[in-house]
Amino acid sequence: MSAFRISSPDGARPHGGTTRPVSRHGSAPALVNSRNVLDRAQTNAGNRAVVQALQRDVGAPTATGNGPNPVAAAPPRQNYVFLMGDPTRDSFYSAAAVYFGQHEKGAQLVRGKRTLDEVIAHVNAGTAAASRIIIVSHANEEGNLGFSLNTADAAKDASSGDRKPRLEFKELRDANASGALPVADATKIDSATRVEIRGCNIGRSQRMLDAIDQAFGGEVSVSAPTHKQEYSFHSVGKGKPVVSEEALFQYSISDPGHPTVTADERARRFRARYPDVPEGRWAALLKAAKEKNTRRKVFTWTGPNPPADDAAAVFARIGTASMFPKKAGWVVTYNGRTTVGDSWHFEVQADRVTAAGSETRTQAIVTRIPPDPDVLKAQQIADSGQPDAHEWTVVDAVVGPTLTRTVYAEHTEWVIDQKIIGKSGVAQPPTSDRTFYGESSFTPSPPPKP
């Protein structure tokens, strides 16, 4: 196994400055004119001004022999590793704790934080600027992270849905817009800070990486794997330290929807995506490739099913044939559909003439207005952490008087459930490798002009 080595900078160093010694001539000649005296006086005055300016700016030695003014060196930067789950209950975190304890010497290994606002607040309270902030968490390709936004969100996560902590793209996007998170301290989190997410597939969500970037102040860079992340460790002998490993898992190619992919095309795409895989391994790998189609309900609306905006549909829904029978002399007219607030009103009018005179009656149906399918779909796309990876559809189902309108997101992956292995063994590519890591691209808005 190749060693996992990451060197971290110790912070920016101040630029040094040097001064040339001021040249001083020997004794002046006995006979000088006033012009020579004035020239020398101006030269000496200029030299003194330069020396004094350098003394102020960089602590240069003075002409009188005083020592340099001290310039404080920038303190070393701090690395952090946040384990966002309980190592005593989850083997992913227990193995990660072993790995980072061995391979991130000097980093502050932080347990017990379960929300993003706690992570930001912890780094803000540090004594030095952060070099690397490593956040270890369960995650997925939609951009979801396995921890909550803040205390209120943690309480909501614990009492609803599957009762698991989860931070979604739309939650973080809205929190950034509303200022619900602590403001990143620019003296601790800056353009030299890297935020590294270690969680499965989250690097596929460009939107989430940019939202995380913004949450940390917008000057950092954020990276995250586009493949499954795993940690492991094993013993090599009694009395010897365990060997720990960080690896990426599962070769994959994906498409929106559920298209047909031929075997030749699938093989070509796998080879193109993973050029470091030795050619001799491809036959066995491709044989193990499996299709995984996922079509999931993203949003469902349920309400009364309104009739179509035409006379036949409304008459049928009201039952005018029995309510206003022709043999009784009734003539039924559709007065149309009107919008009142968030409801539709469908009105019919029935008239007849009897021996006693004329008679007019009206009857109406009132239903809630269903959300427009295109608007509903557009909203879900806007809230998705990875919209381009899916094919989006809206499907209606009518049961009796009830309409159910559902937005589906569908995508298909071909996966090879094996550990990523390159030419030199288990792949531990640098975070700059775009096959295996996504990178944030968020650019903060320029400050307003004074």
Image: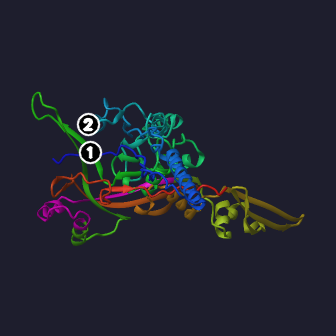
Label 1: few (<14), some or many (≥20) within 10 Å? some
Give residue 143's position: percent from left, percent from top.
Answer: 42, 51
Give residue 257's position: percent from left, percent from top.
Answer: 38, 64
In the displayed structure, 365 sits above or below 53; it is below
Residue carrying label 2? 95
Q: Residue at x 45, y 43 (%)?
A: 61
Q: Residue furthest top?
A: 239
Which circle's residue, 2 or 1, is located before the other in the chain? 2
Residue 4 in the figure: left or right of residue 50: left
Q: Which residues are magenta?
A: 270-299
Say which quarter of the image contains residue 368: bottom right
Residue 201 falls inside the magenta stretch = no
Q: Residue at x 32, y 45 (%)?
A: 8
**Quadrant into which the C terminus falls:** bottom right
Q: Nearer the viewer, residue 394 or 120?
A: 120
For marks 2 and 1, give the CA distance.
9 Å
Residue carrying label 1? 230
Q: Residue at x 53, y 47 (%)?
A: 52
Q: Residue furthest front?
A: 30
At numbered mark 2, what does the secondary structure look like: helix, strand or loop? Answer: helix
Which amino acid lies under the numbered mark 2 shown in the image of this protein? Answer: Ala
